[in-house]
């Protein structure tokens, strides 16, 4: 669990600590959401200190800038122009894309809304008129069916982590889980062909395991070593080489390794792209309707799911070939 002590260690201003605790205890936000807000606010306040000329030591690393001394008077003097300056910095200096900057806008809106309506620290909310960057809609990047099979076949069967890693890739490609959902799978949540997971926003949902998933899990369980696990580590399905629940970074690196080994662009495909792959394959080859896909992926809004209804080049090519004039 989070808590005020943990946020104090993170060197945050008091108002930010209060905001993050509010998100956890009152709004019930997930640890991942709170962590994202924490990162955004830390970056925002450090930027403001530099932007307003309040950092005297030119040699200090950006991440070492103290922001715990930021008080309510400082917060009250933040203007809308400061927020846009921060977004410009995020884009030009930190290479943040549309989605990353949109998340920062959401963080700032939520924070200043809390300060005005709940904490009563500010009378004027500078984020009220803050606009999010326009996000260009793009077709999701995914592996084709043949490419997915090639990825699974690229694993070295003699590797000590073969069964674990094969299980990870199989679950990604078949169930479309989020990275955090996969890392947090607990064995006691697997009942027959169903798996209960906690998804985005702390919402519980059921994932149905097909034959490939069940086989991959069973094969991994036969070689899974818990002899050196401490605490509740053995409750988690996927373990690291240090006998701890596998973390997100480890999964990201192993996915990148196997993507590269299969001959694909490892900069292009991530665990999230494997989630895209599962959704696209279900939609294209499984005739899964959009509402069912929404439930499988755990999307709150169906508009998020609709990106998987894209028409790919193969379908377009077939459509043109089906034209009765095509044989003239």
Image (tube, rainbow, N blue to C red):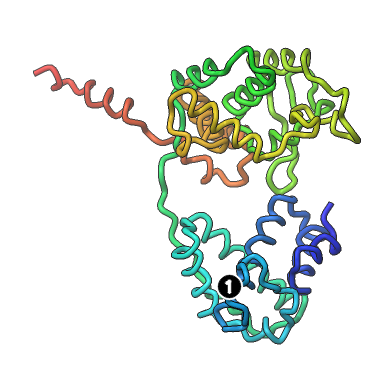
The residue located at (23%, 21%) in the rendering is 322
How many marks overall? 1
Task: Measuring from the top left, give residue 12's x and y in whole percent.
Answer: 74, 69
Q: Which residue position is annotated with label 1?
A: 47
Quadrant in the picture for the C terminus: top left
The residue located at (63%, 84%) in the rendering is 124
Task: Measuring from the top left, give residue 165's x and y in whole percent.
Answer: 65, 23
Q: Which type of secondary structure does the marked residue at label 1 adopt?
A: helix
Residue 77 location, quadrant: bottom right
Q: In this rendering, is residue 71 above or below 24?
A: below
As drawn, the residue found furthest toward the right would be 231
Q: Residues within 10 Å of mark 1 (few under 14, many from 20)?
A: many
Viewer-closest of 121 and 163: 163
As drawn, the residue found furthest toward the left would be 328
Viewer-closest of 133 and 50: 50
As drawn, the residue found furthest toward the front would be 59
Viewer-closest of 9 and 110: 9
Residue 14 location, quadrant: bottom right
Q: In this rendering, is residue 254 above or below 153?
A: below
Task: Measuring from the top left, give residue 20's x and y in whole percent.
Answer: 76, 63
Task: Measuring from the top left, give residue 283's x and y in whole percent.
Answer: 49, 27
The residue located at (40%, 36%) in the rendering is 310
Tell whether 125 sits left or right of 235. left
Tell whether 289 sits left or right of 55. left
């Amino acid at each position: 669990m989070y808590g005020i002590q943990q946020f104090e260690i993170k060197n945050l201003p008091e108002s930010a600590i209060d905001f993050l605790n509010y998100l956890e205890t009152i709004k019930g936000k997930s640890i991942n959401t709170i962590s994202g807000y924490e990162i955004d606010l830390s970056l925002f306040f450090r930027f403001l200190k530099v932007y307003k000329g309040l950092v005297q030591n030119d040699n200090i690393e950006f991440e070492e800038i103290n922001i715990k001394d930021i008080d309510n008077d400082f917060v009250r003097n933040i203007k809308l122009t400061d927020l846009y300056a921060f977004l410009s910095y995020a884009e030009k200096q930190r290479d943040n894309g549309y989605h990353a900057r949109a998340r920062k806008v959401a963080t700032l809106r939520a924070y200043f809304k809390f300060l005005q309506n709940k904490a009563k620290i500010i009378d004027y909310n500078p984020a009220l008129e803050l606009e999010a960057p326009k996000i260009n809609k793009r077709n999701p990047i995914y592996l084709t069916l043949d490419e997915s099979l090639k990825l699974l076949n690229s694993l070295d069967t003699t590797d000590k982590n073969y069964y674990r890693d094969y299980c990870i890739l199989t679950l990604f490609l078949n169930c479309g889980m989020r990275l955090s959902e996969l890392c947090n799978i607990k064995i006691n949540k697997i009942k027959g062909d169903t798996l209960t997971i906690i998804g985005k926003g702390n919402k519980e949902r059921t994932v149905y395991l097909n034959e490939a998933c069940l086989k991959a899990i069973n094969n991994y369980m036969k070689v899974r070593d818990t002899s050196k696990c401490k605490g509740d580590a053995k409750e988690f399905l996927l373990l690291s080489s240090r006998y701890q629940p596998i973390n997100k970074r480890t999964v990201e690196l192993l996915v990148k390794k196997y993507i590269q080994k299969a001959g694909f662009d490892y900069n292009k495909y991530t665990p999230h792209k494997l989630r895209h792959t599962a959704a696209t394959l279900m939609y294209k080859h499984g005739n899964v309707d959009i509402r069912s896909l929404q439930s499988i992926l755990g999307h709150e809004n169906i508009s998020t799911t609709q990106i998987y209804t894209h028409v790919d080049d193969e379908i377009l090519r077939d459509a043109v070939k089906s034209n009765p004039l095509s044989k003239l």
